[in-house]
Image: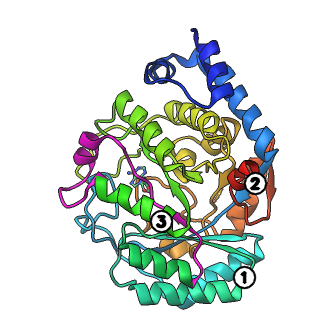
Amino acid sequence: MNAKELIDKLYETSNLTDEELRFLLQADASIDEYLFERADCRRKEIYGNDVYLRGLIEISNYCKNNCYYCGIRCGNNKLERYRMDKETILECCKQGYALGYRTFVLQGGEDPYFTDEYICEIVGEIHATYPDCAITLSLGEKEKESYQAYFEAGARRYLLRHETAGEEHYGKLHPENLSLAHRKQCLFDLKEIGYQVGTGMMVGSPYQTVDDLIEDFRFMQELDPEMIGIGPYLTHLDTPFASFENGSMELTLRLIALLRLMFPYALIPATTALGTIHPTGREQGLKAGANVVMPNVSPTDFRKLYSLYENKICTGDEASHCRGCLEARVRSAGYEIVCAVGDSAKEKFRA
Ligand code: 5AD
Ligand code: FES
């Protein structure tokens, strides 16, 4: 089969063999026009022109982990650390709500200061104040009991990228105390509790191979996540990976399109990393199959400190500025922002 036939097969069956995937992952740029067209078609069948908003609140840049790629790793002693208190987080929600956001994502490093009790208190208060909003957590690996407690407090979604499903690759990105097996266990625990689960990987991280990407697809087929977030790996100078190159926008876009065809109902964000690697990265991501954007609602003072990678966009902007900016970007790509909770269409379609 040639590339066009493979793309048609993927469109029709949402699956390909490893060999076929490898072919599409390694093909030159000439396949992208048709691939993106098919992905956009699939996206429109399911989500129309809708783009959902997620207000992102970066609650802490303390992290007990030391991942080699990440700028907020505990080993980076050049970074000024911060954590928000409950009042600040609620203030972010208030602003986000006024801007039309109906999902709040509380993201942070693995910061023991945020005990389960405190997280539940915060989640409970957001839930009580904004019962019409979805609360998403992205706070790393926890015990199942902790995830259960957050769920009971009102959280319904959890983002935990698996980062790479290649066992060996995982070991090259993380210190020995972290394991792919445990990360996967967390994701399955979250599913079992009833969360809508988001996972994903960095694209072009050091030592990543095409086989690792195929493993990523296979793992996600097994997990069947509601959300899939991917972005290019971007080098942070205060990490052990300082001398590695950035991942590529082109491969990220191709993967977004393949993901849309393989996981038709997935919520796929056009990520901040994609907007950082290229001025129109997010618009291009939307055109390749993405259907979510995640505007930052953290206070401006904290934004530059949440430095996972270099040159992160929006660090000097007010929440309201990002709202307007995204409105224009989404429209210029040919889509429409909708102020809605924005659940995955998976349940609706399978019912
Ligand atoms: N480049 C790109 N993405 C990164 N992340 C962490 N460090 C980097 C980096 N250097 C991503 C990880 C994490 C998410 C919050 O940010 O995938 O899950
Ligand atoms: Fe923040 Fe464009 S989204 S300035």
**Mark earlier in primary sequence (3, 2):** 3
Q: Is residue 241 visible?
A: no
Q: Amino acid at mark 3?
A: Leu
Whether residue 46 is situated above or below residue 288 in the rendered picture? below
Which image quadrant for residue 339? bottom right
Give the quarter the ligand 1 occupies: bottom left
Left or right: where 105 falls relative to 109: right
Q: CA separation, marks 1 and 3?
A: 22 Å
Of residues 67 and 143, which is closer to you in this image?
Answer: 143
Left or right: where 326 falls relative to 223: right
Whether residue 106 is situated above or below residue 245 in the rendered picture? below
Q: Amino acid at mark 1?
A: Pro
As helix, strand or loop, the secondary structure at mark 2 comes to: helix
- At x 65%, y 24%, the residue is 35
Q: Which residue is mark 1?
A: 131
Q: Which residue is mark 2?
A: 348
Q: Amino acid at mark 2?
A: Lys
Image position, residue 99 (x, y; %): 76, 72
- At x 51%, y 46%, the residue is 230
Residues under numbered marks 3 and 2 in contact, where contact means CB atoms less than 8 Å apart: no
Range of magenta residues: 153-180
As helix, strand or loop, the secondary structure at mark 1 comes to: loop
Q: Which residue is mark 3?
A: 190
- At x 64%, y 28%, the residue is 13
Residue 162 among those drawn in magenta:
yes
**Mark earlier in primary sequence (1, 3):** 1
**Mark earlier in primary sequence (2, 1):** 1
